[in-house]
Amino acid sequence: MKRRFGVVLGGLASVILLAPLAPPAQAATGQVAVFSVEFLPLETYENPRGCKVLPAGAHVLANLTDGDVTIFSDQLCLTPAMVTVPAGYGTHVPSLGAAFRA
């Protein structure tokens, strides 16, 4: 029993120590464009990283990056994803309180 505990503890320590050495996820390159209304210019995000809050009145998001963009219903990207938009596609988005992560 003690040996099994030691093996499990050693394996856990290895994971904890080696996790920081894992390569970081590649950020998407390209643009995310958000359309709100006809009389406002597009809001664009060049090579977006991290959680980005969508502008008030947002209507449509176009993913012009080389990776997926995930839409969240909160401004911190903590809730379960609403939808994942593949590269080259777009989607309607909530007009208030939403965010995305590329």
Image: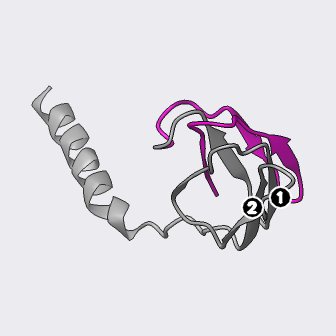
Question: Is 87 or 20 nearer to us in this picture?
Answer: 87
| Residue segment shown in magenta | 77-102
The residue carrying pointer 2 sits among few (fewer than 14), some (14 to 19) or many (20 or more) residues within 10 Å by Cα, namely: some
Residue to which mark 2 is pinned: 67
The correct choice, above or below, for 60 with respect to 40 in the image is above
Task: Please tell me whether mark 1 sits on a helix, a strand or a loop.
Answer: loop
Determine which residue is flagged by label 1. 87
Q: Residue at x 15, y 25 (%)?
A: 1
Report the side of 21 relative to 79 (left or right). Answer: left
Relative vertical location of residue 52 with respect to residue 92 in this rendering, above or below: below
Q: Position of residue 22 (x, y in %)?
A: 44, 66
**Do tag 2 and tag 1 residues touch (Cβ < 8 Å)?**
yes
Image position, residue 96 (x, y; %): 61, 36
Horizontal and vertical percent for residue 82? 67, 32
Q: Residues within 10 Å of mark 1 (few under 14, many from 20)?
A: some
Residue at 69% across / 43% down in the picture? 57
